[in-house]
Image (spheres, rainbow, N blue to C red):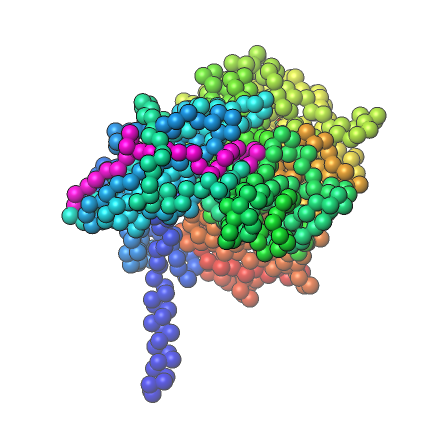
Amino acid sequence: MNKKVILSTVLPLCLLISFAQVKVQHLLTENSTNPIGLGVQQPRFTWQLMSDKRNTKQTAYEIKVSGNKGTMWKTGKVGSDQSVQVVYAGTSLQSDNKYTWTIRVWDNDGKASAWSETAFFETGFLNTSDWKAKWIEAGFTEDSINRPAILFRHQFNASKKIKSANLYITAHGMYEVQLNGKRVGDAYLTPGWTSYNKRLQYQVFDVTRTLISGNNAIGATVGNGWYRGYLAWSDNKNIYGKKLGLLAQINIVYSDGSTEIIVTDEKWKSANSAIKSVEIYNGERYDARDEKSGWSSAGYNDAAWKGVNLLSTDFDNLTATENEPVKKHETFKPIKLITTPSGEKVLDFGQNLVGWVVVKAKGNAGDKIVIKHAEVLDKAGNFYTENLRAAKATATYILKGGAEEIFEPHFTFFGFRYIKLENYPGEINPDNFTAVTLYSDMKPTGTFTTSNALINQLQHNIQWGQRGNFLDVPTDCPQRDERLGWTGDAQAFSRTATFNFGVDNFFSKWLKDVAADQEPNGSVPFVVPNVLGHNAGGSAGWADVATIIPWNMYLAYGDKKVLETQYPSMKAWVKYMTNASKNDLWNTGFHFGDWLFYRPNDDNDGRAAVTDKYLIAQCFYAHSVQLLINTAKVLNNSADEAMYTDLLQKIKAAFLKEYVTPSGRLVSGTQTAYVLALNFDMLPEGLRAQAATRLADNVKSYDNHLTTGFLGTPYLCEVLTRFGFTDVAYTLLLQQDYPSWLYPVKMGATTIWERWDGQKPDSTFQTPGMNSFNHYAYGAIGDWMYRKMVGLDTYEDGVGYKHIKIQPHIGGGFTNASASLQTYYGTVVAGWKVEANGISLDAEIPANTTATIYIPASNATLITEGGKAISGVADIKITGTEDGDVVLQVGSGKYHFVVNK
Ligand code: BGC
């Protein structure tokens, strides 16, 4: 054998052997890559197995965790297939410490992987006594009218060589912090929004590289933010407090092992900033002439600054940051400079987005640029801001003059596609304007594409609705004087949200505020954090956020901890409904009902789709109890499971007695009534099929249109598919006239609208009092698109996509539809294509998971995989047929199926 032959045969063999070994990658601690500032004693570890071999599973793992004092945890070989959220059980973790970990696994051939690369995590302050800093406030009387942002600064000496340094910081208000003249970190609108009185998050930044041995200076700007800015309506301000404040602490470790702590205390200085006023709804006014150049650097002369006042307050409400902070993401350049019919200068960024515009300008000192924000132009093509209601949404910059200046606002954000410029000095060059998006730094996880461009645009709009409204809390809208954590909207959209972005930490954090703001009687507020007062809660479909989102997080991420943590809150909400019920019927109290359901202008014929609010309440009551039964089961609480099972039977019996005629008609004949009754199994088996037929007939009676509002819409297509009316679901999905999902798309929408008819066919608008063009609730159809149309789902016996379900529903004239989802196990892909002589299906199943795949074929002999009859493919088990599908069981790997006609 010559050398060439040896190389060409032996080399691939070696490669094959080395590839055949399973690898471990993508190590996550508390669902993040190398997080710092963790506030938990028992972080959870997740890893992914990589293998190019089909049917790879983990049979055992071994984890090693080390700290600066050596080994913290050595599991030894643990026989287990768990690779997601394995709970740390080693030696007690210490505050403000760095730990590293590494993992190896054994696969189902008994082969061990190599040890993974090491990952790390750093703990935050695990005890309130770790805080040595004191809260400081301005040492002068604040301007109570304009309420400018305040600067705090402090110069200090770091005497020795620095090994590591972490900055711990939070504020009463929103803060931005600089060290030695440089912005620290890339988080915005910090400390984020929580129910501050009970839970105020602090952030931790690694400042090792910014600190120097010698003189340093730290400076923080603090503005009103959610803490004391205007929120909601009727001049509602100072919700959490009247004064801005700062709490900061730098923990330094020197190379010689000694430590030093720098804290906010009486030695700090304070002054007014160039941010003359700033409010979330109204925007910012900035006067560059008042900039204090060098204020956050050592050596700056702060003799004219005032001292600070100390605030004696305990640290009990302080908590580590759990979710991803708000960061800058996509940027947009103007696609058009428009002079409107009324002569306004308007820039169009082509996308309705949330964030702000970075502006470059050159002019004279005192020149004042005014920038207004709008989502839409009106019928005539003029700038339209009426739907922002009282929100001024304006950025004003006063130039200091001379060289080119660059501006962006700080403690505010805007929902806009267009900006109107007033007094811009010189010619308007679109190049000088960049729109920057701001939203929680969730990881993009999902893709969805089809052969239909309008549906692809709908998916785009759903994702942009999520980007714009996942801004530390799930908001209803980002532009008008509202932007609140409306609970109904959030629960309606939550399952869809899990497909597009990683929202596990986002919702875990917010759910803690749901629990924190729950009333002692269990009532859940309309908005969380609650800024509407104590009597604003308990509405069916809104308050059920307390049960619905924890369960959705468990399904999507296999996150059992969220169920454990929220269980008392879930139970309290159900208790509230039980207490408000008589004979198991919940028919009291205020309810929003099926918010924004179909209401024709001229309703002589009684076509408005009004659903009895108490019928809705009874359905959600049952649903919440069902979710408690499910949760009790997961948490092995059999006593609760039995108790709630019993309660559920009574609730359903009361529903039947009150709202269903003996022949199975509901007292409200609307789509939403049938959808809820069917989706939540309110009807006995025997009455379901005919109820589903009534629903389908109802859709037809509206000339194939939906009539549902916030509560019916999320489950409408879901129920139609479940009862065999996928064709009707497709008709609704593809409907282009109002009300429908595609009507806004046809009208040029780039986000989901609040109302089905935000802009009418004649281009006039719905009432400005409530007409947001960026409201994610109706985007809840995304769930059906992923889970039913493409058919990418998880089983409840293997949540978090441990046991994947792929069951496509081909139809609607689409020639292809596919989706991908990054799960904790790895990427799942599903997609179908209608071809000339049959259909093809692609699936990708990550290692350490299994899938059940439904192939639309009358029998298995019609199906090939990778060009071979499936009966001959070793990795595929044919387990039966069901409703026209052949059912297969597979392990991990990539599969290409063809069904021949
Ligand atoms: C919000 C909502 C919310 C609704 C409840 C509106 O102002 O924008 O989306 O769910 O009020 O009434």
Q: Is residue 147 left or right of residue 302?
A: right
Residue at 32%, 25% (x, y): give it: 310
Residue 441 x/y as whole percent: 46, 45
| Residue 383 vs residue 525, the one in the foreground | 383
Residue 567 x/y as whole percent: 42, 27
Please state the quadrant of the image where ligand 1 appears: top right
Residue at 66%, 61% (x, y): give it: 835
Q: Quadrant of the N terminus?
A: bottom left
- Give the quadrant of residue 246: top left
Q: Compared to 490, does 890 lie above or below?
A: below
Q: Is residue 874 left or right of residue 250?
A: right
Residue at 34%, 77% (x, y): give it: 10
| Residue 412 vs residue 530, the one in the foreground | 412
Q: Quadrant of the C terminus?
A: bottom right
Residue at 29%, 53% (x, y): give it: 118
Q: Is residue 774 visible?
A: yes
Residue 495 x/y as whole percent: 54, 39
Magenta residues, as a range? 257-283
Residue 254 x/y as whole percent: 20, 46
Q: Is residue 146 left or right of residue 789?
A: left
Q: Work out which residue is located at the far top of the displayed protein and give it.
A: 582
Q: Work out which residue is located at the far bottom of the displayed protein and give it.
A: 2
Q: Compared to 310, does 733 lie above or below?
A: below
Q: Compared to 773, does 50 lie above or below?
A: below
Is 272 in the magenta? yes
Is 693 in the magenta? no
